[in-house]
Image (cartoon, rainbow, N blue to C red):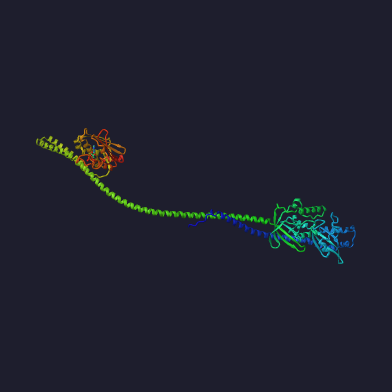
Amino acid sequence: MNTTLPRIRQFRWPLAVMAFLVWLLALRMTNVYVWQAELDDLRSQSQHRLSLFAAHLQGELAKYEFLPELLATEDRLAFPLVHAAGEASLIPTNQYLQKINDIIQSSDIYLMDTTGLTIAASNWNSERPFVGKNFRYRPYFQEAMKGHLGRYFALGTTSNKRGYYFAYPIQRNRKVLGVVVVKVSLGSIENAWHGGPDEFIVTDPDDVIFLTTNPQWRFTSLHPLSAETAEQIKASLRYHNTEVLPLPIQFKEKHGNENHVVSIQETRALTEVGLGNHEKTESSDKQKNKVETEMKTSTKGRTPDPKMNRLEYLMQSVPIAAEGWTLHVLSSLEPVKKQLYRAYVLVSFIFIILVVTVLFLYQRQRRIQEKVFYEQEVRKTLSQARDELEIRVEERTADLAKTNTRLTQEIEEHRRTEAILNQTQEELIQAAKLAGLGQMSTAISHELNQPLTAIRSYADNAQKFLDLNREQDVHWNLTQISDLTARMAKIIKQFKVFARKSSGQSIPVSFKSVLDGSLTILESQIRQGQVTVETDLPEEDLFVFGDMVRLEQVLVNLISNAVQAMLETSPRHLYIQASRDQDMVVVTLRDTGPGIKEEHLSQIFDPFFTTKETGQGLGLGLAISYQIIDGFKGSLKAINHSEGGAMFIVRLPRPPSVQEEHTLKGKS
Ligand code: ADP
């Protein structure tokens, strides 16, 4: 399998960008879903509160709605209208109105004549009494004069207090005598709803806020007023001389007809002057003055401050047809936003966990794949290597087989050659020995003739002494004969040993035996040559590793050469010395002959090199001796002695152990 996961490093940035985009998408989806869900939730909650608020407001107004009609039936009010009298005569009427006002807890109650002039009022005794004031410009008066209930909301021009006015005509005999007005303060409603989770506002048909739980919004409009509308409002004195400014509100999202998401810039106005938020219901003059001042300040200082926050609300509205008002509830979106931020955090957290998990799983998968891949690669490489090895082994085996065959053939050939060589060598050695015997034949025949002649003489003597009955002499002669035959047998035995073929095996051999044997063979030659042989051997018998016959052949050859070399010189001494040198036995044979010429030193071991006359030497003696010694892993060297004469040095290996030496010594 060659396919592997793509390396994440190569795609790091595209993947990061993709992850970022996915994260953004997740946030966007969270936003849509949570926002909508929370908004729906909020909507239903504040909708409910809006209904309650509307019910409360309408309930408050309804309480007073029929009071003017009731008061209009009161003759105590109709009477002064019919019988115009002095101010003093109106005191009971004023007191009556004051009493009723106290009972029903309205703001003010006052009586107007048909010209709109207030002739009696519940606040007749206050600092700013309505008595003497003409309110004919008020729509409620005009409505009442038409014979039915007049209702109107306005900021009192005298009291500077917001109030809802119910006016009813006092009629007698279908004639309108005057109008009785009950003014209701709505400040208590603001107080009741203030401090809740929502802000409530009530707007007039021109969208001017006249009632609100947030005093900063009071007498502002939801939309900028047209010049014409502003003029009309001013003319109607509805809000006295309060300037109506637009509320810094932005309508953002629209949900259905009556639902909006809006943002309102906070204003600093009232909070800065430390004004209490609410219009109090107290009726004392002092308080009235305070409220007036506050109202002025509030309207003048109500300017949007860009440094302050814009707060977002869900705004829901419900119209109140009777008054032409619209009730609005503004629910802060802060909880929704908080909820949304929480959801963002949660989604981001889940996203991070997912990314980490995916990365972890990817890395794990990648490691597994890499492992599998490398294992396969290793297996493949191993198998290739094995195949190559097998091929190489096969080739090599074939080569080796060929070489082996060739070697076997060569070995075979070598063996054959060796066999031939061995045979040739054997034959040569044998030839050399026989040649040596040939050379020695004169000496041998002389050696044997002499005792034979002596034996014959002793036998003749013995015969003669037998005839003479000289038994003792006969005995002596026969003893001599016996000794001589024993000696002859000994000589013949040596030659027999010398002439026989070697076994070719290396065994520990006593050097003394070899030397003795050799000297015995050459005894007559040495004697004839008048050579004195001096041997210098150590006390202990020295053993060498070799073959008795061959070693004798070497020594016979060396001694014989020395004897022959000394025939023309004098004195004639042959020194034979043997000693141990570590694992070797060193034998030196030094003669007092003429020595070897320098130019011949490098040649004397060559086959067929001889300086002797024809028939005297074959030139094989030293060549074969060299081969024999070399075969025993020894060495043979020739030098000229500093005092004259030739010196041959033979080095032969000693047997492995002394114990063996003793064993073999015992045998010999
Ligand atoms: P051959 O004895 O048949 O000549 P060798 O191989 O035994 O053959 O000797 C080769 C030659 O080495 C001899 O001809 C002789 O010149 C020289 N030689 C050998 N031994 C001695 C010696 N002890 N002194 C002087 N020359 C020697």
Q: Is residue 69 visible?
A: no
Q: Position of residue 36 (x, y in %)?
A: 66, 60
Residue 127 sits in quarter: bottom right
Q: Quadrant of the C terminus?
A: top left
Q: Position of residue 86 (x, y in %)?
A: 90, 58
Residue 224 sits in quarter: bottom right
Q: Is residue 363 left or right of residue 450?
A: right
Give 317 or 516, whichever is nearer the viewer.
317
Residue 255 position (above or below residue 407): below
How many circles with numbers are drawn on the protein? Answer: 0
Q: Position of residue 640 (x, y in %)?
A: 26, 35
Ligand 1, seen in the image, is in the quarter at: top left
Q: Position of residue 356 (x, y in %)?
A: 57, 54
Residue 152 sits in quarter: bottom right
User: What residue is rendered at 64% in x and 59% in y?
Assistant: 32
Tell which residue pokes out farthest to the left in this image. Answer: 467
Tell which residue pokes out farthest to the bottom in this image. Answer: 174
User: What residue is rendered at 62% in x and 58% in y?
Assistant: 28
Tell which residue pokes out farthest to the front in this image. Answer: 227
Q: Is residue 31 visible?
A: yes
